[in-house]
Amino acid sequence: MSIATAAGASTATTAGGSEAGRTDGELEHAHGSIGPAASFGGSVLGPLPESASVLELGALPDSPSALAPPEDEESRTTYGSWQEEAPRPVDLARAVSFVAPSSVHSVHLSHLKPHELRTISRLRFSTHDLEEPPPPPHRSPLVRALRWWRSWALPGMGMFVEAWMIFAIGNILPLLAINYPHCFGDAQPPSCNQSAADAVTYIEVCGIILGMLVLGFFADIIGRKWGSRLTVTIMLVGGALLTGSAGNDGQFLAMLLTSLFLFGTGVGGEYPVASSSAAERAEGSRTMRRRRGEMVVLTFSQQGWGNFANTLTILLLLAVQGATGAVVTPVQAEVTWRVQFGIGTVICAALAAYRWTYLQESKVWKAERHDVAEQLAQKGIRRHHSPHEYKLVFRFYWPRLMAVCLTWWCSNFMFYGHKLYQSAFIAAIAGPDATLFTRYQYNLLNSGVALVGYYFAAALVDRRWYGRVRMQAFGFLMLFILFLLIAALYPTLLSNTGAFQFLYLFSSFWNQLGPNCTTFLMASEVYPTAVRSFFHGISAAAGKAGAVAAASLFPQVSARAAFYASAGAGALGLLVTLAFLPDTTGLDLHEIDRSARDCQDEPLHAGGAAQQLSRPGRLPSVFVLV
């Protein structure tokens, strides 16, 4: 029997080429030897002599003869309990049913140290094809298109509701200024604390950060299903309060801020839960595994649809009331913002009903939870989650955590800053005399252009020649160039609105075909399943800290300075992406989980498999039994 290591493969095969299941027994270390015997491919491994030669895992020997088992009498005696002599290494070209990559090395068990054999015995070779196979392709193109749409649209409805309600703040601020001119407008004297009134643009982001950390943590404990139910329930309560906000200026402001914070808390939990669920759903399906990035990005694209649909709804409500001219009455303004909040709440209620009735638990999360519990049970610990996992993830994955957090911070500094204040930027593009209805039309155009970027990102993100890192780096580069041009030419662009509009809309496109999608995706891929939701929440919370920074900074500076600041954030994001971020394109998430479990066993032997697998930035090797 021999062992092959290969990056990117995760199949356990027997000498006949068939797929092997979970090992029948596990190797244990006892008094310097390995026992009891374990069965691999129908053969039983006996005790290993201490004098056996050693070949480090993943190392390529200088000559083919180094791979052969020892020919001396001691070797034949060692294996005499089950056959006369040790078998020769199997010819991989004939033994396995797939074409092995050039990096495959054959290592005989007799060349391994006891602690390395113990590491191998802990590896889980059970299949991770956990999702039910999809039905055969339907003959009707329409049915095929509906199945494809349903595979990502329904799981992404939480992001749809999030964008509908959160991005609505930038849209309805002019309407609130009409309804409450002494609080949100320029009427004197002010009836509200102006600092509190300004907090409307970022109070929901503070709630989002809280939800990302708290609900993201609990989603790893209670599961993706209950995490999804909890987040949508909080959003439903917050949406109902937003729709019913009323009272005098001070009372309305207090209720609005409370409702936004509560709704934002639910939205914060939606980020890590939706991302982790989408990645694990694709990882558990043989047919979708190579399209994992596409599925996660398409799920995230519902954010773009929510923003687009909300802007379109506001336009339709104004048009129905005849509020397309220069004057919008307070009644028309209130009906518009209150009804659009109400529609979003109804959608949220329908989503809550679905999740409480039909939503299923992530099979990948359940399988990993079982494996972790089994490993902890071997240490006499009866639980499914170990606090030690968080320490290990920080220890071995801190470069990835830092890179994802910083790049997400840069992305949201640009994205949310311009979204929350897009009405001011659109006013500069449309002109000072443009009606509110005309400005909403520009908003709709901007949302539509951004929406196209989501689908370009979904089409390219799994292509190995482009992938995650190149997409993010090029997106940051384009945003840096575009925002720098807008800032440098700002006085000229104000008199040439066509060029200004093109550059601003083009920046929205590249933000989606770049860091806004890739940060959401990569945070669901670079961490193990057992802590994926929580660490995704940490990464996303760092991103939203960038949004808070932008929301606090942009009102204090000119529009030109805001564009300069955005260009600087793009440059920083580009440098961090190229310097620190690992490319997860095509990476099997099952291997991240396996290497993370291996990292939990102490001590980590120098040069052993556990240390090899846990090095930050290195893609884990895959062991193939032949």
Image (cartoon, rainbow, N blue to C red):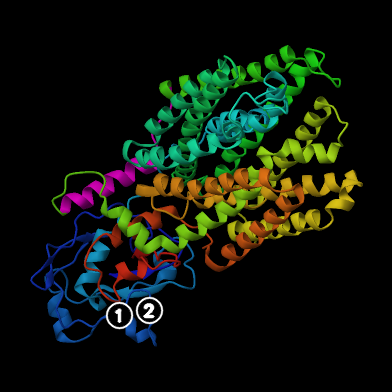
User: In which quadrant of the rendered image does the C terminus lie?
Assistant: bottom left
Residue tagged 1: 55
Residue 1 located within the stretch drawn in magenta = no
Q: Quadrant of residue 145?
A: top right
Left/right placement of residue 333 relative to residue 401 reads: right
Residue toward you, 274 or 177 = 177
301 relative to 461, above or below: above
Where residue 59 is drawn, which disc sits there? 2
Amino acid at dot 1: Leu
Look at the picture and state if 183 lies above or below 286: above
Q: Position of residue 195 (x, y in %)?
A: 58, 35
Q: Residue at x 71, y 55 (%)?
A: 479
Which percent across, then down, holds residue 424? 75, 38
| Dot 1 alpha-carbon crowd within 10 angstroms: few under 14, some 14 to 19, many 20 or more | some
- The kind of residue tagged 2 is Ala
The image shows residue 440, relative to residue 380, as above or below, that is: above
Q: Which residues are magenta?
A: 358-378
**Residue at 75% across, 59% down:** 481
Q: Secondary structure at mark 2?
A: loop
Q: Nearer the viewer, residue 163 or 6?
A: 163
Which residue is at a point 57% across and 17% down the rendered structure image? 243
Q: Count numbered badges in the picture.
A: 2
- Using the image as rendered, state which of residue 592 and residue 533 is in the foreground: 533
Residue at mark 2 to residue at mark 1: CA–CA distance: 7 Å
Name the quadrant of the N terminus: bottom left
**Badge 2: few (under 14), some or many (20 or more) residues near its Cα, within 10 Å?**
few
Q: Are marks 2 and 1 in contact (CB under 8 Å)?
A: yes
Main SS of residues in magenta:
helix
> Can residue 359 be seen in this snapshot?
yes
Q: Outermost residue, right direction?
A: 495
